[in-house]
Structure formats: structure tokens, C-alpha cells
Image (spheres, rainbow, N blue to C red):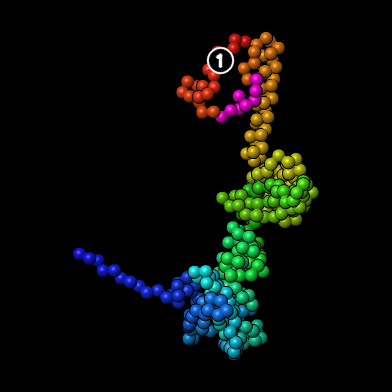
Amino acid sequence: MVKKTTIILVTVKDILSKSCPIKGFLFRTVEMTESPKKLIKVTIEPRKNNRAKCSCCGKSVPTYDTSPSERSFDCIPLWNIPVRFYYRMRRVDCRHCGRIITEAIPRAIGKHRLTNDFRIFLAQWSRLLSWKDCARMFHAKWDSVFRSVQWVVQYGLAHRVPEEITANGIDEVAYAKGHHFMTIIYQTNDGARRLLGIVKDRNKAGLGRWLTQTLSQSQLSAIKFVGTDMWRPYLKVIREILPQALNIPDRFHIAKKLNEAVEEVRKQETKELATRGYEPVLKKKPLLLSQARHQPNGSSKNSPQRPPELQL
């Protein structure tokens, strides 16, 4: 028995309605233009009985008039073809604000010519591409990418909850040739890795000033863990400002200090064995710290047999 295959025809309007729905509005027409470049032109109209909202207080108010010209908004490209929305803005008579003002529209803010979806899209891709390449790939301007990233960062700063910070990371980053460093402070609790601040240089005064001026005393008291390297100014600031926090050095410096301690013990043991007339077994550091895969009998594949135990 042959199964019947149902073919569903999908138009660009259907794709936009599913991927970018605009509550209270509908896509009236969708057409492709070839001059001066390819462009998907989408005309938007409000639905019947749709009351405009004041862009100041956000309440539904009567319409005062409608603009005779269309305002355009760029959206996320489809098949690498730019998509542009066209809409005739309405002005509203808001009795709550006591003035005539342009309506608020979803998926766009103020007089920005990019939809919010497109701005978030550009900000996300700017993490993988340079701003110049991001603008070129998605038919935008460099300034549009910059303002999109700025808008997303400002939104994140305004909506972050610093009271939830219980674990911090403090690290240094070189930003220019020579010994030029800056200090970055980021949140690490609950699997989050969020940048909190950047301080020029890596001295005690700069880090201490940022902690005391940015975070309140209750927020500082809530920090339980701080991850840092072994840079002494960082350790002093944590000891003075965050005495209740457990300082956790990073793995690199822990391994470095451990290797230095093992090397010091090896040198002492080698010297002591030599003075007592015995031939030192571990004359070189690589032999002690090698990570060769051991055979079942306890010796590595390419290393000599283990010498008998010394009778001291």
C-alpha cells in the first residue's frame, strides 16, 4: 500500500508569521525588489480593533492620526536576502501623559531602524566575528552592530541581580605589548560566568576601590568563594575586604607550586644521598615528573627496570 504524501505550500508570509509574530499586527504584503539590490519588502498593518499603546506609559489609548509616510525597520535576513518592514506609525492622544505622542510598537524601541530580534542576532554573532565582518555578512552597517552590542550590554547591566553573587573570579589580562595588564572581575556561581567589571592595572588600590564602590556591604558579605592567581595584591585585597571568603588559587599556580615543592625535595634528597655515599636515583627532574604510561609490573614501557630499594 502506497502512503499518500501531503505537500504543504509555505510562503514567506507564513515563515515570518511563525518566526517573527507581531501581536496585534499582520503582514499585509510581501514582495521582492531587485533594484537597487535584492530586498524582501514587508508591509505591516494593525489589525482591526487594535488600539495603539502610548510609548511613554504603555497604556492603550485612542489614535490621534496616522503618518502619511512609512517608517522602515530592518529584520533578520532570509536566505541572505535583507528583510525590511514598512509601517505607517500612529500618534496617540494619551490622557494619562497629557500629550500627543508616537505609539509604541512591539519588537522595536523608539526610533531605532532595527527590530529587537535583529539587534540581538547581530550582538550574538559579534561574539564570533569581528564587527566589520558581522556587518558585511548580514547586510548591516558597522554602527548598527556597535549599537546592537551596546544595547544588549546595557540591558544585561540593568537587569542583573548582584545579590545572587556568591562566588567571584579575579584574573589579569594583558591588553597591549609590554607589561600592560588589566583586572577582570566575573561571577562564577551556579555555573554562570558573567563579567562584572574591568579595572585598569592590577594593583591593590584599583581592585579594592572597585569592590567597595560597586558592591554594597551586604553583597560583599554574601561572597563565599573567590578564585584568583597567586598575585600578592589580589591576595591582600581578598584578605582585607573579603575575609569570610575562601580563596581558591587557579589550577595552573597550584600545579606550579606543587612542582616547585617536589623539585626542592628532590634536590635535598639527592644531596643527602650523595653525602652518605649512595648514588642518587633521581638525578633529573623530568625522570621524577614524567607522566609515562606504566606497565602492570610498575615500570614504564621505555624506561629501565626499577632499582632495588635502598637500605638506609
In the image, the segment drawn in magenta is 283-291
Is 116 drawn above or below residue 25 in the view shown?
above
The quarter of the image holding the N terminus is: bottom left
Above or below for 182 versus 145: above
- Judging from the image, what secondary structure is the residue with disc 1 in? loop
Is residue 245 among the parts visible in the rendering?
A: no
173 displayed left or right of 35: right
At x 77%, y 47%, the residue is: 178
Q: Is residue 284 magenta?
A: yes
Residue at position x 63%, y 66% in the image: 145
Residue shown at 71%/54% (left/top)? 198
Tell me the quarter of the picture where residue 106 sits: bottom right
Give the position of the C terminus as an image quadrant.
top right
Residue 3 lies in magenta, yes or no? no
Give the x, y percent position of residue 124. Answer: 58, 61
Residue lying farthest right?
A: 205
Say whether residue 117 is visible.
Answer: yes
Q: Looking at the picture, which amino acid does disc 1 mark?
A: Pro
Residue 132 percent coordinates (x, y): 64, 64
Does residue 116 appear to the left or right of 245 in the view shown? left
- Seen from the viewer's position, the closer of residues 25 and 146 is 146
Nearer-the-camera pick, 251 or 208: 251
Is 52 situated above or below 311?
below
> Which residue: 50% across, 21% down?
298
> Mark 1 — residue?
307
Task: Examine the image and state in which quarter residue 95 appears.
Answer: bottom right
